[in-house]
Amino acid sequence: MAINLDELDSDQQIAATAPRGPVAILAGAGTGKTRTITYRIAHLIDQGFVSPNRVMAVTFTKRAAGEMAHRLRLMGIGGVQARTFHAAAMRQLAYFWPQVAGNLKWKLLDNKFPLVGRAARAVGVDSSTESVRDLLGEIEWAKARLVSPEQYVDYVADRATPIPAPKVADIYRRYEDFKISPDGMLLDFDDLLLHVAGAIENSLAISEEFREQYRTFVVDEYQDVTPLQQRVLDAWLGERDDITVVGDANQTIYSFTGASPDYLLNFSRKYPHATLVKLQRDYRSTPEITRLANTVISFATGRAAGTRLELEGMRPSGPQPTFDSYEDEPSEARGVARRVKELLAQGIPASEIAVLYRINAQSATFEQALSDEGIVYQVRGGEEFFKRAEVRQAISQLVRISQREKLPEDLIGPQIHTLVKAALIPLGLTEQEPEGAQARERWQSMNALVDLAEELGHATPDLDLHGLLQQLHQRAEAKHPPTMQGVTLASLHAAKGLEWDAVFLVGLTDGSLPISHAIKAGDEAIEEERRLFYVGVTRAREYLFHSWAYARQEGGRASRKRTRFLDGIVAEAKPVHPPQRGKRYTHCKSCNAVLLEPSEKAAGRCSQCPPTMDEAVFETLRQWRSIVSREQNVPAYVVFSDATLCAIAENMPRNEQELLSISGVGPVKVERYGQDILDTIAQFC
C-alpha cells in the first residue's frame, strides 16, 4: 500500500502525518476533514505505527461511518472499525456482558416512547404524543449529560423544562424502573454507553482486553460530543493519548441533545503536548459564499466562538448570494420553484439543488410549489431509500438471481452494474425516463441502484453479486443511500455534512430562524441558531439563495420580521410580488425583487442595491444634461432624471435600440437626445 500525500494541501499533510499522540484538527466547512482523517489513518497504518484492526474511528452517523469505511477500502485498507458511538458500544457490550452480568439477559429498547408514556400516566401527567415527545427528549438530554433522576432537579435549576422539574424527575425515575423485570433488563441507546463505560472502568480484565485490542482512536465531529460519550472515550483510552479529534466549534448545532463544544475547545488544555492544525481552505464553496459565511459567523458570541476559523474559498469566483423577501409563504414557495426551474434549464442536475428550512413542517408549501412546476423532489428524512417498495423488489430480484443462476465470470467488479441493469429491466427499468411523477420516481430509484452497483464495482474490482448484496445490506443498515435525481428538501439539521451546487435557505424569519423557543431561552440558544444558519450557508458550492415571507397565508397580515442574522449583512429588500397572468414586471438586476417605484424601474434596481455604473460616465452625462437644460430653459429632470442617467451609465447602450430598452427613455427623447447620449458614452468605450 502506498499513500500519496501529494494529494493533500500543506495543512492537510501536517494533520495526516502528525506524530502518534493527541492531535486536534480544527476543520472548517468544506476543508476536506474526512479526506484528511482518512489519510491520517492510512498513513499511520502505512508507516507501521498501528495495524488496521487496532484502529477505531468513531463518527456520529451510520452514513458517515459507511463513507469513511468506503474511502479506506478505495485506498486498499480493510479492518478499521468505523462505527458510531452507539454501534461500537452495542458490539462491545454484547461481547463483555457475560463477564459483567453473568446470566442476566438484556434486550435493546429501540422505542422508548411507550415506556415514557406509561411513566407520565403513572405520575398523572399529560401523555399526548407531543407531551411524551418533549419528556423523552428531556430524559435523553439528562442521560447524555450524565444527570441521574436524583440529580435532575438541582441540575436544571436554571433550565427551562417541559413541565415542573420534580415531575420530570419522577417520570425519569419511573422510566428507569420500568426497564427492569425478573426476565432481564431493557437497555436504551444511552444505557449501552453507560454500561460499556462502567464495565471498562470497573473491571481490570475487561479494560486490559479492550485496550489491548484498540490502540488508536479517531473521533469525527468532536464539537458534538456529549459528556456521556466523552466518558466512554476516556474509558476506551485509559491513560493513553493516541487520539485524533476533528471538529469545528462554529458548527455546534446539537446542544439540545446534551452535546458540548467544550471538549474540542479545551483539547489543548487536556493535552498540552497535542498537535493542533487548522484547515481553512474551503474547496466546496466559491469565494462569494465563504465571504458571506465568514461574515455570518463573525457576529457569533459565547463559548463556541473560541476557535475562530476564517474560510478561504478555493473555487473560482461565482454569482453573489441573493436575498428575496415575499409577501407570504405561498409566494415564496412559487418564487423558489421558479428559480429551481431556471437552474434546471441551465443544466444543473436536480440532485445538486436543495431547499433547506428550520423545521420539517415548512416543507409542505415547497413540495406543492415544486409539484406544480413538474419538478421531481425528495424529502430527506422521509421514506428511506432502501425501504422503498421498488428498491426492496429490485434487491429481492438480485437475491433470486444469485441463488438460482451460475453467473458469467466477467460480470464482476466494474461490470457488475451490467448484471444489475439486466436484472431490473423486467421490473420496469427502461432506457428513457418515463412520464408521470410516480413512474419517474420508481425509475429513478432503480437507476440509482444501478449507478451504486457501478460505483461499488469500481471500488472493489473482484466484487461479485453475493458481495454486492452484502454491501447493499451494509449501506441499508448504515442508512447510506445513493444519490437520487431529485431536488432535495431537508431541515438544516438534516443537511449537516451534505453539500449541493445550489442551495435555497427559506423561511428566514425571526421565530423560525432563530426558532421561537430559542428566542425565549436567551443568548446561548440564539447563538446556536446562528451557527445553524452558518451550517446552511456553507452547504452551497456555487449558488446560494435566501428568502423569507412576511405573512403565512396569501392575504394574511404581514406580521413577521426578517431573521436578525441578516442584520448588518444585507439591506432588507422589498417583497417580491407573485406574478399575475398577463402582467409584466420589472425586476431588480441585483436581487431580482419586483420594482414598484418609478425611480427604481428607471434605474433597473432596488434603492437598497448599490449601483454598478462607472461614476465618470454618470458625471459626464449630468454635465451634458446641465448644458441642455440651460439651453432649453427647462429643469434638468425634464431632460432626463438622475435615475435614468444612472441606468444609462450602468447599461452603456451602443445604439438607439438599446437606448430605448432603458426605462425612462422613449422614442421622443431618443429623437431629441439619442445621438448626443451615444456620442457621450462612446468616449468611454
Image (spheres, rainbow, N blue to C red):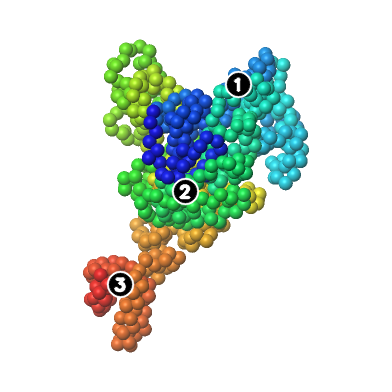
Question: For the residues carrying marks 2 and 3, which lies nearer the camera in this image?
Answer: 2
Residue under the point 58% across and 29% down: 86
Residue 263 placement (x, y as % from top left): 61, 41
Residue under the point 62% across and 22% down: 208
* Alpha carbon distance from label 3 to label 1: 85 Å
Name the image quarter holding residue 251. top right
Residue 170 placement (x, y as % from top left): 75, 33
Which residue is tagged 1? Answer: 209
* Alpha carbon distance from label 1 to label 2: 39 Å
**SS at badge 3:** loop
Name the image quarter holding residue 605. bottom left
- Determine crowd level at label 1: few under 14, some 14-19, many 20+ residues with C-alpha closer than 10 A: few
* Alpha carbon distance from label 2 to label 3: 50 Å
What amino acid type should be assigned to the residue bearing mark 3? Val
Sequence-first tag of 2 and 3: 2
Kindly indicate whether the residue at mark 2 contacts the one at mark 1 (C-beta within 8 angstroms): no
Residue under the point 73% across and 29% down: 174
Any mark on residue 280, and which? 2
Any mark on residue 665, and which? 3
Reply above or below: 646 against 244: below
Sequence-first tag of 1 and 2: 1
What amino acid type should be assigned to the residue bearing mark 1? Glu
The answer to whether residue 358 is left or right of residue 42 is right
- Determine crowd level at label 2: few under 14, some 14-19, many 20+ residues with C-alpha closer than 10 A: many
Residue 439 placement (x, y as % from top left): 36, 31
What amino acid type should be assigned to the residue bearing mark 2? Gln
